[in-house]
Image (cartoon, rainbow, N blue to C red):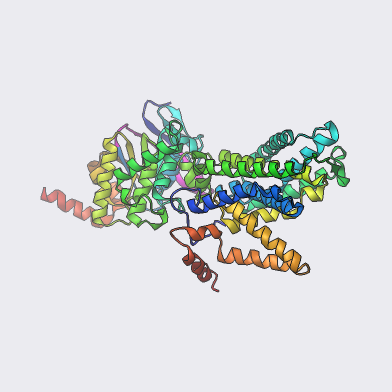
């Protein structure tokens, strides 16, 4: 993703201000979805919010710090198991408690893993994260206390829409956190590492430290989403908690919307969920093929996402530039 | 332990069988401008990398204000007050010129005292000093070569350094641009920043340096005031070549 983008952000690292306002508006409108009293739209909306949160989390380490993680589903999975374990072993149903515990577990796991693997650069880090995602699923599958391969049940709270609102709050908080980070010194430390790690170190940025911080923030967001998801889903087993989709979709969404922007992940989550849903209902057999094609088209023509079209530089010329770069 | 402000003591750097630096020692006085010269491959950039903490020397050490800095990581060296520019410029391509400089102001020696807004203000001040205020909002990747060199200097200055290592900031500049660069370095030095200047341009080095160290094949072959160092037969032979030696003789004959 760091490879020679034709279009670029200018003036700040939050991304296009108008796109951000529009996206924040969409998020606010989404708070009212449960008032439709439609189980379908509520589930769909909660799915968008969940993927947006996962994508926002990935965007901190992958988009801002430039370290492409293929293992963020680990934190989502651990977060969801926190909710399941709290119910199974202590009969705790509190969503707030689950979210807080999940974030603590996610951050602790990110810190312990981050110290060694964030010393790796570029692709090596990506491969290590993928290994961790697969290994963690296997380990959880063998822990009886977590239900091993057969999983754990969670009794959902009585007012089911509570999970929608909880996911909305987690998503909104993640987006607000990203916005505040992108306007702070912390955000510039991440971006400096993405742009040139050696040059960042010479300017006083401790690369390992800030990469670990980025991954921990990333983990907190994913774990919180997992905690809410587990309650709403009512059941947790390793394939559900560590689903490949939950690993891949958020990355594609961030790329589609715009990596290293505040609004990008939600925009990507909305569009991709809509496309996925439409294709699924109309072309169930070849839905995956279409979905793959969408990913290829996005990566080739919009390597930095839709939101980058609104920048003063690049814009539509960026698409033409991509065409040239790929000799299409 | 040394009394000197910045002291390079018996520094050696070996890359496998290659001895890039061999037992190099010299001191740098506070407030001075040290010219570091030598033919290509003589170890100048390697020495810069050691002083700025990018490389750990094979032998020897560097002392700054009496503190041993050979084992201090790169990011911490700049917080002690040693900043550098890169021979091959390394701007953050997707950030604006002002943002590039602000990162230094955020994480340099006085970075912990500044919030983001104060860092941007400091960046703007520095851009005015180096003459880049007119392009503050442009992308670093849009800059011309001379402006990229200025940006390197501004980023280094944003760290509020006591010592600034300049690795060929004048390479590739035309005569007017070199004069402008020298003017900038004098301004910086006048503000109390000690400079170590690596450069190939003799005229530039002689006009700005208060002392010169000459490296050849990883060893220090001369050290002293610019005029006497350049008059040294060994330096003329190793570095300046016969043509310069002739001109030097002619000049001496005239005066």
Tell me: residue B29, above or below residue B123. Answer: above
State yes or no: residue B93 in magenta.
Answer: no
Look at the image and tell me whether residue B43 can be seen: no
Q: Nearer the viewer, residue B63 or A77?
A: A77
State yes or no: residue B23 in magenta.
Answer: yes
> What range of the chain is rendered magenta?
B11-32
Q: Position of residue A70 (x, y in %)?
A: 68, 52
Q: Nearer the viewer, residue A192 or A50?
A: A50
Q: Nearer the viewer, residue B149 or B210?
A: B149
Tell me: residue A249, above or below residue B163. Answer: below
Q: Position of residue A221 (x, y in %)?
A: 65, 42
Look at the image and tell me whether residue B75 can be seen: yes
Q: Quadrant of the N terminus of chain B?
A: top left
Taking the spot 83% from the left edge, 47% from the top edge, the residue there is: A237
Main SS of residues in magenta: strand
Q: Position of residue B230 (x, y in %)?
A: 25, 46
């Amino acid at each position: 993703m760091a490879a020679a983008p034709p279009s670029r952000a200018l003036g700040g690292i939050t991304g296009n201000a108008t796109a951000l306002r529009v996206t924040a508006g969409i998020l606010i409108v989404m708070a009212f979805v449960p008032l439709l009293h439609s189980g379908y739209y509520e589930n769909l909306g909660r799915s968008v919010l969940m993927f947006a949160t996962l994508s926002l989390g990935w965007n901190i380490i992958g988009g801002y710090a430039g370290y492409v993680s293929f293992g963020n589903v680990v934190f989502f999975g651990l977060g969801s198991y926190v909710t399941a374990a709290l119910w199974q072993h202590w009969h705790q149903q509190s969503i707030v408690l689950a979210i807080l515990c999940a974030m603590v577990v996610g951050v602790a796991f990110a810190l312990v893993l981050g110290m060694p693997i964030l010393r790796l650069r570029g692709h090596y880090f990506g491969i290590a994260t993928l290994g961790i995602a697969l290994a963690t699923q296997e380990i959880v599958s063998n822990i009886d206390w977590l239900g091993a391969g057969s999983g754990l049940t969670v009794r959902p709270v009585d007012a089911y829409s509570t999970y929608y609102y909880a996911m909305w709050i987690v998503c909104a908080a993640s987006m607000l956190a990203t916005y505040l980070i992108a306007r702070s010194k912390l955000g510039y430390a991440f971006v400096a590492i993405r742009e040139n790690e050696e040059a960042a170190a010479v300017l006083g940025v401790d690369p390992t430290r800030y990469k670990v911080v980025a991954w921990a923030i990333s983990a907190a967001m994913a774990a919180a989403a997992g905690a809410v998801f587990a309650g709403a889903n009512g059941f947790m087993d390793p394939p559900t908690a560590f689903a490949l989709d939950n690993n891949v979709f958020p990355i594609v969404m961030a790329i589609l919307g715009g990596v290293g922007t505040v609004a990008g992940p939600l925009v990507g989550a909305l569009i991709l969920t809509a496309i996925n849903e439409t294709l699924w209902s109309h072309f169930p057999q070849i839905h995956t093929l279409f979905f793959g094609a969408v990913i290829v088209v996005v990566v080739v023509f919009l390597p930095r996402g839709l939101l980058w079209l609104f920048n003063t530089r690049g814009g539509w010329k960026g698409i033409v530039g991509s065409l040239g770069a790929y000799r299409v | 332990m040394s009394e000197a402000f910045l002291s390079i003591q018996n520094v050696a750097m070996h890359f496998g069988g290659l001895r890039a630096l061999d037992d190099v020692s010299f001191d740098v006085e506070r407030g001075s401008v040290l010219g570091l010269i030598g033919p290509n491959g003589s170890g100048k950039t390697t020495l810069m990398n050691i002083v700025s903490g990018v490389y750990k020397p094979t032998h020897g050490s560097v002392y700054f204000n009496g503190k041993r800095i050979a084992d201090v990581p790169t990011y911490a060296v700049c917080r002690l007050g040693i900043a550098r520019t890169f021979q091959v410029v390394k701007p953050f391509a997707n950030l604006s010129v002002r943002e590039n400089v602000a990162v230094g102001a955020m994480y340099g020696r006085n970075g912990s005292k500044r919030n983001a807004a104060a860092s941007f203000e400091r960046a703007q001040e520095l851009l005015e000093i180096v003459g880049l205020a007119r392009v503050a909002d442009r992308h670093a990747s849009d800059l011309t070569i001379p402006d990229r060199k200025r940006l390197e200097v501004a980023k280094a200055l944003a760290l509020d350094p006591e010592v600034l290592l300049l690795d060929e900031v004048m390479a590739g500049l035309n005569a007017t641009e070199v004069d402008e660069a020298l003017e900038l370095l004098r301004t910086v030095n006048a503000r109390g920043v000690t400079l170590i200047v690596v450069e190939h341009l003799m005229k530039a080095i002689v006009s700005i340096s208060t002392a010169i160290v000459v490296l050849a094949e990883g060893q220090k072959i001369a050290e002293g005031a610019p005029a006497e160092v350049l008059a040294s037969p060994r330096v003329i032979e190793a570095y300046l070549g016969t043509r310069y030696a002739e001109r030097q003789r002619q000049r001496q004959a005239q005066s």
